[in-house]
Image: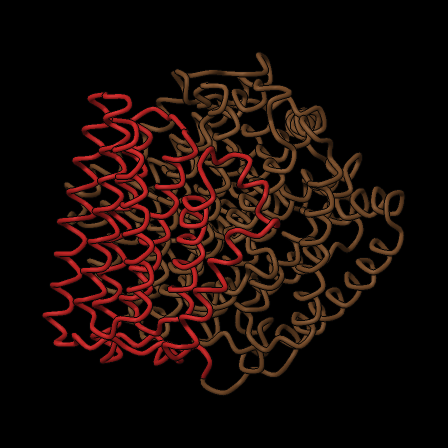
Amino acid sequence: MAILLLLLVPVIAIALLLLFGKWKNFSEKISVVSSLIEVIIGVYIVQQVLSTEVINYSLYFSINALNALFLGLTVFIGLIITLHSIGYFKEELKKEMLNEKKLREAYLLIRFFLLFVYIALLTTSPILMWIAIEGTTLVTVFMINLFNRKTDLEAAWKFLIINSIGLLLGLLGTLLFLAQGASQGEVLLQWKDIMNVNGVLNPESLKLAYILVFIGYGTKIGLVPMHTWKPDTYNKAPLPTVALLATVLLNVAFLAILRFTMVVNQEIGATFTSQLFIFFGVLSIFLSASIIYTQKNLKRLLAYSTIEHAGIIALGFGFGGIGILGAMLHILYHSIAKTALFLLASNIVVRYSTSIIASIQGMIKVLPITSILFLLSILFIVGLPPFGMFFSEFYILLSGFGNNIFVSGFVLLLFVLVFVGFLKTGMQMIFSEVPEGIVKGEANYWTLIPVGVVVIVMLIGSIYLPEFVMQLVTEATDIIQNNTL
Amino acid sequence: MTDILFSLQLFALSLMTVSSVMMHIVKKNNTLVNAYIMQSLCLIILLGVELSHQFSLGLVVITLVMVMIKIIIAPMVFSGIIKQSHLNLSTSTYLNIPMTLCVLLALLGFAQSDVLSPFFLLLPVGSEMRIMLIGNLFMSIFLIINRKGALSQIIGVLSLENAIFVLGLFLGIRQLHALELGILFDIFFWIVASSMFVKMIYQKFGSFDISSLNQLKK
């Protein structure tokens, strides 16, 4: 019942936005109320999962610790981004980057996006998950083009075509998985059904199907070489939107791959999937680390950082063992830290009217609170001890050194490169002279309080993870390790 | 009866392959849209054959929705864009026609290589059908890469989707019709969204040519 409620809330919000969106400030209010209710239901569902392990709703929806972890993150990030958007869009309205109609459109698109994400997270059907993720693509393309500039249109088109091809390949892979039961005359509706046609699955066709699914959803994640849409999209889309893509969407795509991974691992062992995760993981870290060091654009820097962290997560799943725990923790920490970084970047870009790093100087004098939060977030994202990301990366590398010492050593070197690149850029932006003509002062409370909460959560989470979070993470890790779906 | 149905399947697949090749070499946007209609009609024929094997109301509904989306709505939307923009002449390809045909030949050759043997294991059909089924997939992907027009890229994606749908039919996958309808509605909204973007590209860049979309590099 709670699952149905969670899906109904954004549907009702969408209906209300369509009907009464023209009323003054109605879009903001209804979005906040909807987000708050989603958080309450999300917390209730997580609590239920912790006590009963699995909640089912009809044949098509089910939730265990694995998707509960992703759901908890999604509702939290959804609320924060909705709150931040109020302040952000106010500033963009002042600058005439958008009008009232576009503003209503933006709030509507965020609700649609979250609705599709909830469906994708909660469904037991690979086809329904595909439909929902394709739905996020259609919504995102309009979000990218919100400001309707030439470059936005170009980025949106690139996103649409690359992601559509990727997802169609993902659909093809999904169909090949489902075809495994066709020869036996079985109808495979859920991932569990695919697992249950034990002994019938052909290892070679399973591998081919998995590669296609990996490429398909890997495009959504932005793993190299399927990442080409990412820097352009992140550079052009409104930053709260980008925060959703870099956290919520990335997690959903990982969940899709993980579900197929468990099917394959159950049938043919983990070697094949591990190799793919490690290969694409290292490639992603290598490319992004080399670009982060020399990057001159803040939004692109964060885009490559997202690619790098997607690579780290993939590496964790590839290494297995304690690496999986590291990857799950990394998903958690990365989602929170990247939300903070993108929302803080939106404060910076709104104030300086540019994302070129060389033009963003003297931040500590212009945006003092944002600067401090930004510095803390940078230190967190580069994995400096004692921040949480240090531990997740440590677990992943620990597992890696036991598995493949050369790969782990190489990745460790790349981490150093990213560390230096990020710190160099951060210091240059924060501690330098203020350029002429820049108005000093933070924009408004909406752009500070939500992101401040995220940073506090991030810092507390580094030294103390509440018991229920730790239970979710360990149970989710067990699900992946034991292929229990 | 079985022989007739098999011949019909073979005919539809051959026609589908011919339309895929046509999409690569035609110069006019209208002809490109016609080639897409022809390809989609083949898909409907194949669905008709499936219906004769196992009749169900759900499958009839899916066939009708598919006719609506692929044979009526999508071509109407595309023709509308072509009329509005007065750009019937399609933009060029990256490779010239002889080279394009060579690549298509190579792709059809690759469709029967041993690398794809895992595919063959799942496809309970003869080699001639297999080549066309897999070849259509490759040719559609190549269409998206090789043609410079935004409209051609849309039709390339839809052609890929047709090829995957046909492959799904031959793989014998059965899903609940509600889910199949869900995929079709996704495709419908994809057509609507991508057409809106093609229009916007024409309004902002004065052309369908995606090679003119180079603002991000500046």
Tell which of A161 and A339 is nearer to you. A161
Query: What residue lies at 45% left-to-right and 56% top-to-bottom?
Result: B138
Q: Is residue A339 visible?
A: no
Q: In this picture, is A343 found above or below B40?
A: below
Q: In this view, does B128 lie to the left or right of A426?
A: left
Q: Percent from the top left, x then y, of residue B130?
A: 45, 44
Query: What residue lies at 28% left-to-right and 77% top-to-bottom?
Result: B91
Q: Name, please, the residue furthest toward the bottom.
A: A436
Tell which of B155 and B200 is nearer to you. B155
Q: Percent from the top left, x then y, of residue A345?
A: 52, 64
Q: Chain A is drawn in which colour?
A: brown
Which quadrant is home to the N terminus of chain B? top left
Q: In this picture, is A366 found above or below A279?
A: below
Q: Is residue A428 left or right of residue A35?
A: right
Q: In this picture, is A348 found above or below A328?
A: below
Residue B181 in which image quadrant: top left
Which quadrant is home to the C terminus of chain B? bottom left
Q: Is residue A275 visible?
A: yes
Q: Percent from the top left, x then y, of residue A326?
A: 74, 40
**Which chain corresponds to the colour red?**
B
Residue A1 in which image quadrant: top left
Q: In this view, does B127 lie to the left or right of B20?
A: right
Query: What residue lies at 36% left-to-right and 37% top-to-bottom?
Result: A115
Query: What residue lies at 30% left-to-right and 60% top-to-bottom?
Result: B154
Residue A375 in which image quadrant: bottom right
